[in-house]
Image: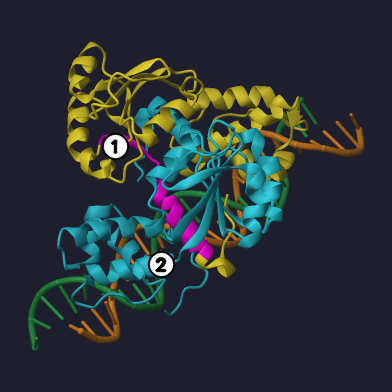
Chain colours: A yellow, B cyan, C orange, D green
DNA sequence: TAGATTGTTAATCGATTAACAATC
DNA sequence: TAGATTGTTAATCGATTAACAATC
């Protein structure tokens, strides 16, 4: 593992996309691919692909290209997908249920170990063999073992108070589906935001201004 | 409405965030704000805020700042949120149910008018007063009135075939929750992707490489 | 060897930040 | 008027693309 220093967010955010396309190629039995061919499939320039990959090391062979399976594995390693970060989910409403049911945590570097909600009617129900617990149990559960990451699927107004509790339990990594901006409140925290309504509004803008729309992937 | 030409995606993707923060300020009764104060709250530079807003017109007053409510309304207009684009949702599994239940379409420029699924056990059930229909009805329903946008909450493998049907019905705008890459298949289409697992993998990378993590909002 | 394609450096392009004149 | 803060131009910074030498 050479280099890997000061990798820009632009590069990092492209890694899962590489991973996805390589997975597909692998499944289709493709053995080798050149940056040029990958560029056609993915819509990045060949130059960018080579540049990106070379942030992490020379995975290709000059004159030949890249071995699909090897590159796939390398990117999986770079992403750290063989981790089993301990994740807990807060909020078992529609969104929380969708996320916990739908997402393959195990192949993305995480294990979902607990689900919390404050709604009495949900507590005790199971999602994927995990029993929804009362949020009051949070401190007790985290005492044993501090979770590495918390998934926030709760309404905007509940986040501030809850984030305080989580933060003081030592949880510093968040997958945030709420509209609350954690990163500004706690500067030493890693937050990945999924702002669904921002995405929807962006789509609305682009549809409303279709003529000037810039294609983007 | 002056300028507004060649607005870059970077600027457009910040608009919903401005909208969100201004909404909060408005709710808190804040009347005026300077780019400097907004910069502290939002984590953008004041310079960038002024630069961004000036893509669309001069909404501020020199020596005074911006009137919160007015700026909020302006950005809402720019985003086109008063549209009622006709949206249909394909796939009423966990994710589709979460999206359709959770999202306030009406305040984001859309109306959800129909929900389709192929799963017999879901057909006939209601979400928000909308009855889940058999996907076989798709063509019949779209005959009356072509939807403006389709929300794709179906498994990766079903997308290709379905996208063909939708595209040939004249639907050219998509909110895509699947991992399938529509934009490459149909170049004249507007797609907003929500790649949840990409986001999760990015978080995994950042957690795995915490020391070098670059803060990002 | 000749052909292909990488890894890497250099050139370009675009986005962000700084500076400041305009003006409320 | 003086002070504040915008709108806008210019400078900087970073990311993307092009080019090409290295090498399989």
Residue at point 18% right, 75% down? B64
Q: Name the foreground residue: B79 vs A190.
A: B79
Chain letter for mark 1, please.
A
Residue at point 29% right, 18% down? A124
Is A128 left, or right, of B27 in this rendering? right
SS at mark 2 in the image = loop
At label 2, counting other C-alpha atoms closer than 10 Å, the crowd grade (few under 14, some 14-19, many 20 or more) is: some
Chain letter for mark 2, please.
B
Residue at point 39% right, 48% down? B103
- What residue span does the magenta drawing correspond to? A188-207
Q: Is residue B176 above or below residue A93?
A: below
SS at mark 1 in the image = loop
Residue A40, x across and y down, in percent: 72, 45
Q: Is residue B186 above or below residue B158?
A: below
Magenta stretch contains residue A215: no
**Residue on which the image places disc 1:** A154
Rounded to the nearest whole Å, what is the CA distance between mark 1 and mark 2?
Answer: 27 Å
Q: Name the foreground residue: A193 vs B69.
A: B69
Is B100 left, or right, of B185 in this rendering? left
Residue B51 can be seen in this image: no
Q: Is residue B155 above or below residue B103?
A: above
Residue B100, x across and y down, in percent: 44, 45
Per the rendering, the mark at residue B98 is none
Residue A49, x across and y down, in percent: 63, 40
Q: Name the foreground residue: A23 vs B138.
A: B138
Labels 1 and 2 share a subunit: no
Per the rendering, the mark at residue B82 is 2
Is C22 left, or right, of B204 in this rendering? left
């Amino acid at each position: 593992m050479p280099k890997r220093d000061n990798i820009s967010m632009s590069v990092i955010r492209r890694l899962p996309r590489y991973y996805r396309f390589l997975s597909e190629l692998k499944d289709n039995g493709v053995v080798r691919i050149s940056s040029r061919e990958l560029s056609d499939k993915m819509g990045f320039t060949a130059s960018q692909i080579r540049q990106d990959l070379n942030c992490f090391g020379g995975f290709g062979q000059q004159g030949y290209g890249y071995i699909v399976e090897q590159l796939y594995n390398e990117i999986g390693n770079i992403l750290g997908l063989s981790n089993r970060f301990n994740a807990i989910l807060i909020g078992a409403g529609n969104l929380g249920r969708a996320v916990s049911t739908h997402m393959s945590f195990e192949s993305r570097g995480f294990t979902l170990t607990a689900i919390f909600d404050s709604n009495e009617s949900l507590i005790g129900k199971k999602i994927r063999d995990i029993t929804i617990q009362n949020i009051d149990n949070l401190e007790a559960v985290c005492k044993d073992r501090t979770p590495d990451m918390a998934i926030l699927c709760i309404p905007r107004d509940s986040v501030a108070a809850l984030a305080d509790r989580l933060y003081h339990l030592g949880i510093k990594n968040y997958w945030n589906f709420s509209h609350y901006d954690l990163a500004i409140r706690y500067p030493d925290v890693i937050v990945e935001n999924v702002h669904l309504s921002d995405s929807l509004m962006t789509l609305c803008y682009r549809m409303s201004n279709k003529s000037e729309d810039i294609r983007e992937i």
